[in-house]
Image: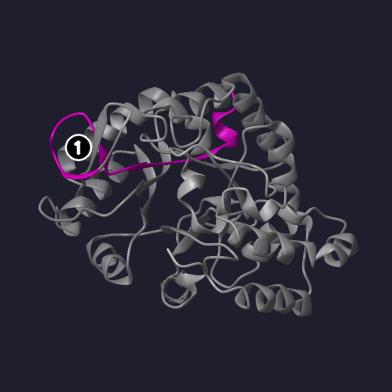
Amino acid sequence: MHDRTLGSSNIAVASVGLGAWAIGGGPWWGNNDDVESIHAIHAALDVGVNLIDTAPVYGFGHSEELVGRAIAGRRDRVVLATKCGLWWDDVTGTVHFTQSGHTVRRSLAPRTIVREVENSLRRLGTDRLDLLQTHWQAVEPCKTPIAETMACLMDLKRQGKIRAIGASNATPADLDEYRRAGMLDVCQLRYSLLDRRLEAELLPYCARHGIGTLVYSPLEMGLLTGKIGMDQEFPAESIRHHIPWFKSPHRRRVLDLLAGWSDLTARYRCSLAQMVIAWTVQQPGVTCALCGARRPADAVENAGAVRVQLAAADLARIRQAAEALSAPQV
């Protein structure tokens, strides 16, 4: 399964990775069963998934702690990716959001990055991170120059604390600055059948410059699995409550779209989730799709997408149908 590499690094990954945002819990995702989450991570590793992507801010350390517990004794089987840049320990940085009594700020200052890395290593129970990504880019009034951020990241790499460097939620101009200042291996961005904006610039940019891509929310937070019906409701603080595709009648249009692909899932002997993930990782420039899972069955199902190879005509059919589905007004 591990047939793709992260940029110019020698780090091999499967085309499907495990995203650990939801297992952090909190108001956006609700309460989780931590034991079940750990079992989901084990299930993913057992079927060949090797990349786990987390971040300090996911549950304010809780996601990293759960990942650390899950990979104990299995560390060498895991490509461990986490992030830096969302900081809540003091007033350094530009305010990004407030949640659960924490004011989270964007900070890519070297001092806060070093602190975040030490905290992540402790929570994850490891001595090195395979991939460290800047989570969100710094903005005024506390915008650390990317050259200073990259100098810090390159120093951490020389120390052996990180193996590869990535930037998440970055623009082509940001990536130019990272590349001028050091070696950038990965760009992580949101991408799905329903949100293809990065096809215009970022995917071609990364392909041209040999930068690996990790795409998050390929299943649109579960909507593209077909398992979220019209009657399911989400509390006001839920992350799904704020996604326009979950509003009626937009959700109805998505479910009708998915229903039209029953012949394809029968032909490929796969679930809707597997077909959508397979479509995603077969797009030019996509290295790995990060799929969340809080239950073992979901982790196994998502991983099964690597076995689904869609024919060119079916890739085109799926795209055409998705493009005909106009995006909802925000």
- Per the image, label 1 sits on a secondary structure element best described as helix
Res. 164 in view = yes
State left or right for residue 28 relative to residue 76. Answer: left
Q: Nearer the viewer, residue 236 or 114?
A: 236
Q: Nearer the viewer, residue 220 or 124?
A: 220
Q: Residue at x 52, y 62 (%)?
A: 191
State left or right for residue 108 relative to residue 310. Answer: left
Residue under pointer 1: 112
The scheme the figure's colours follow is one colour
Q: Determine which quarter of the picture holds residue 89.
A: top left
Q: Which residues are magenta?
A: 73-96
Res. 14 in view = no
**How far from the left and from the top, in percent, is residue 318?**
71, 72
State left or right for residue 234 relative to residue 110. Answer: right
In which quadrant is the C terminus drawn?
bottom left
Q: Give the crowd class for mark 1: few <14, some 14-19, many >=20 residues within 10 Å.
A: many
Q: Residue at x 27, y 60 (%)?
A: 182
Q: Tell me if residue 227 comes above or below residue 269 in the rendering.
A: above
Q: Is residue 169 within the magenta segment?
A: no
**How far from the left and from the top, in percent, is residue 87?**
24, 37
Q: Tell me if residue 217 comes above or below residue 89 in the rendering.
A: below
**How far from the left and from the top, in percent, is residue 265?**
84, 60
Q: Residue at x 79, y 62 (%)?
A: 259
Q: Tell me the amino acid under the disc marked 1.
A: Thr
Q: Determine which quarter of the picture holds residue 287.
A: bottom right
Q: Tell me if residue 44 comes above or below residue 304 in the rendering.
A: above
Q: Nearer the viewer, residue 151 or 271?
A: 271
